Amino acid sequence: MKTNKIFIKIVQLLIVFIFLFIWEILSKYNVINTFIFSSPSKILKCIINLYKNNNLVNHILITLKETIIAFSLSILISFIIAIIFYEIPILFNIFEPFLTIINSTPKVAIGPLIIIIFGASQNSIIIMALSITLILNILSIYNGFTNVNKYLLKLLNSLNASRFQKLKYLIVPSAYSVIINSLKINISMTLIGVIMGEFLVSKAGIGYLIIYGTQVFDLTLVLSGIIILMIISYILYLFINIFERKTKKHS
Amino acid sequence: MNNKIIEIKNLKKSFNDSHILDNISFNINKGEIICIIGTSGCGKSTLLNIISGLDDDYEGNIKYYFDKNNIGYMLQEPALFPWLSIKKNALIGANIKKLNKENDISHLLKKYKLEEHNNDYPDKISGGMKQRVALIRTISLNPELLLLDEPFAALDYQTRLNIEKDVYSIIKENNLTAIIITHDLSEAISLADKVIVLSNKPSHIKNIYDINLDDKKDPISNRKDKNFTYYYELLGKDLDLFENK
């Protein structure tokens, strides 16, 4: 089992190295347009340069801070709303069509409106990220709450368990895997929302670097930003995995 | 008898224009084991839900001569929480009712050879063990009335006999009153003091039999009693299991 895991890791790393190697060779011999596609070595130099001269760490920290705030708010708000919907099902029936309609609206379209309402600040970026994740989150957590084992629910009813006891002993723990999956999807969705927000209003952050690179036609900078984002996204995903392992329930 | 604990009179239940229970009337005395038998879907579980208080949408009258909150309900499934250890599962009823039953449950887990699985999770133990945990969880609350809805249905025959024996001894040792729903005639005769036969839907009571075996010991030896076949044939005829000649 362990050898299998190591083998998979080696193959995954090999795929990355082969991809980077082919990309480097193709750009070195001008088989691909280096202005558009740049090359791994140029991107690496760009990232080192950003680190030395343009405070890359600060840009990363700003994007990370916005992502973590938006992510935490999204989980907290959606959890509370899902519990309210579970406790008062008629509220869910009333609001479900509105949630579906709002969720299907392209969020970029409401970006300018968010900026006008909340100003050209970090608040708008966080609201932008929330607008992408919140409704999906509410729906998936609520769905997890409603799909509980009917025998366990009947048992708690037969024991005259209070609403709080049902939530504590059954509803929330049984939605554990749904909540974890929702966290995994959410972290990357939040990052997408933050970057979209940074495209629109920011003066710092990885989204700002990408949009700046596009404006000055420095596509190496754009690709560097994208690669940094991929690394951030992967690290955040790893954090959720560690959280999952630490809190693993036998569900 | 004056030690009546439940009196059911003219109980009727309908659901979505479908008539499920029709004029059900019977009494239960303290310390009795009542088995209710009937064909699938005849409303046995509905009747149990009504008696337990989980379903209060019915016509008729049920009079409880004890605290109605003190009913223990064992379901068709062991209903163990997969994310809780065996001991925590056994303790959940006590935790919900805010009772300190730690010692009682430890003792029961030891008695039913589950002590070594205290910290295991339900997916690590057999079906019979799970049912024992469910039983410990139920009886640790000292219920006045125990309701068992086909508690042995999912078990293999040998485990089933062993669990029946455990349940029977627990009920008799603690002088509990129990209503057991079953499809199995031999299970009903070997466990019950009284068997109630329900008809097809809309269910009414076809017959109530007092089971008088010569020497009641445990469900396995009760099956060897000379009167066992007599009751088996009576109940079988009521349920149209034998061809009429």
Image: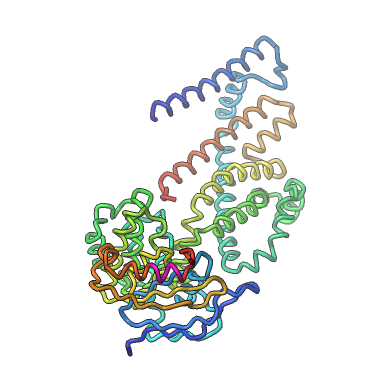
Picture residue at 51% right of the left edge, 20% below the top = A14
Residue most toward the bottom? B2
The answer to which quarter of the image holds residue A19 is top right
Secondary structure mostly taken by the magenta-highlighted segment of the chain: helix
B102 vs A50: above or below = below
Picture residue at 67% right of the left edge, 42% below the top = A198
**Residue A115 as seen in the image, left or right of residue A74:** right
* Region in magenta: B233-237
**Residue A218 as seen in the image, left or right of residue B58:** right
Taking the magenta stretch, the answer to whether it contains residue B240 is: no
Give the position of the N terminus of chain B as an image quadrant.
Answer: bottom left
Q: Nearer the viewer, residue B43 or A123?
A: B43
Question: Residue B10's spot in the image, x, y percent?
Answer: 51, 85
**Residue A34 as seen in the image, left or right of residue A161:** right
Q: Is residue B180 visible?
A: yes
Residue most toward the top? A29
Q: Nearer the viewer, residue A115 or B163?
A: B163
Question: Residue B113's spot in the image, x, y percent?
Answer: 24, 56
Picture residue at 51% right of the left edge, 55% below the top = A175
Q: Is residue A167 visible?
A: no
Q: Nearer the viewer, residue B65 or B69?
A: B65
Question: Residue A225's spot in the image, x, y percent?
Answer: 63, 31
Question: Residue B40's spot in the image, x, y percent?
Answer: 51, 64
A70 vs A90: above or below = above
Residue most toward the front? B245
The answer to which quarter of the image holds residue A86 is bottom right
**Residue B81 as seen in the image, left or right of residue A88:** left
